[in-house]
Image: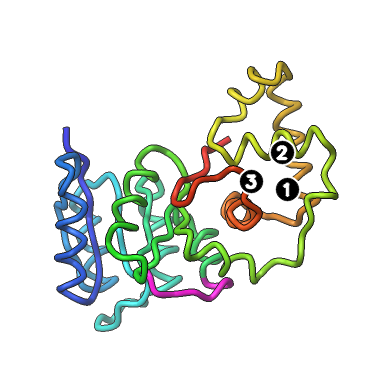
């Protein structure tokens, strides 16, 4: 069965490009297009979808776009993952989008291929962060050093950012799930991270064995 996707952008040419790249693999189908936040939310009220790809700023309606739109999507459709396709590079805005429930950040400057990668990664249950945005998120955090981590915390962190789940890491290292979870949280706290997106950006910057364009597995 094809995945049902809704796309939103105030530029028709962008919508066309997204539709083409999303449907190219024959696994997804764009079932709805919107040109503003009001239209997108109206469509979702009656059209069941598996994922939303939307721009951040879409002027032209009576309903607020940006953060207000993302919060409305999270509140009204909590089970529908959202990919944000944007030109935003402001770290604070990107972090707010992630806190609002966005599961994928695709940078428009990276081309429509970034949207394709984001869609596939998010539908696989992982967080996606365009490599071009990694440095933007890092700007919001203080300078961090891996030297503050214990050897076991560093070991867990390296494995976690490479993709395996907490359960899989526990089995690999022959530790309990609770121990691995505790070590991961301890490492994130020491480094000053509040979420996986910040960790992903740091891992990319530090070259912790994380390929460009891949996502983080959920715990």
Judged from the image, the secondary structure of the residue bearing numbered disc 1 is helix
The reply to whether dot 1 and dot 2 touch (C-beta < 8 Å) is: yes
Q: Which residue is mark 3?
A: 208
Determine crowd level at label 2: few under 14, some 14-19, many 20+ residues with C-alpha closer than 10 A.
many
Foreground tag (3 vs 1)? 3
Which label is found at residue 169?
A: none
The Cα atoms of the two marked residues, 2 and 3, are separated by: 15 Å
> With respect to residue 134, does 200 lie above or below?
above
In the depicted view, which residue is nearer to us: 8 or 69? 8
Dot 2 corresponds to which residue? 184
Which circle's residue, 3 or 1, is located before the other in the chain?
A: 1
Q: Residue at x 47, y 65 (%)?
A: 132
Q: Is residue 62 left or right of residue 24?
A: right
Position in image of residue 145 (x %, y %): 79, 56
Residue at image position (63%, 46%) is 208
Residue beneath label 1, please? 188
Look at the image and give the residue range highlighted in magenta.
86-93
């Amino acid at each position: 069965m094809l995945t049902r996707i809704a796309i939103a952008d105030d530029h028709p040419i962008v919508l066309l490009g997204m539709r083409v790249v999303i449907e190219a693999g024959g696994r997804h189908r764009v079932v709805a297009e919107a040109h503003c936040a009001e239209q997108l939310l109206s469509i979702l009220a009656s059209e069941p979808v598996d994922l939303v790809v939307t721009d951040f700023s879409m002027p032209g309606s009576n309903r607020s776009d940006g953060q207000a739109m993302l919060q409305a999507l999270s509140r009204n459709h909590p089970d529908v993952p959202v990919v944000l396709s944007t030109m935003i590079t402001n770290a604070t805005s990107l972090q707010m989008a992630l806190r609002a429930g966005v599961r994928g950040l695709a940078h428009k400057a990276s081309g429509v291929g970034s949207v394709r990668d984001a869609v596939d990664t998010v539908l696989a249950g992982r967080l996606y962060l365009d490599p071009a945005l990694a440095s933007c998120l890092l700007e919001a955090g203080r300078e961090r050093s891996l030297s503050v981590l214990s050897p076991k915390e560093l070991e867990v962190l390296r494995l976690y950012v490479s993709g395996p789940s907490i359960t899989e890491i526990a089995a690999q290292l022959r530790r309990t799930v609770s121990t691995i979870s505790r070590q991961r949280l301890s490492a994130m706290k020491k480094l000053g991270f509040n979420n996986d997106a910040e960790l992903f950006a740091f891992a990319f910057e530090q070259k912790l064995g994380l390929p460009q364009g891949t996502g983080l597995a959920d715990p």
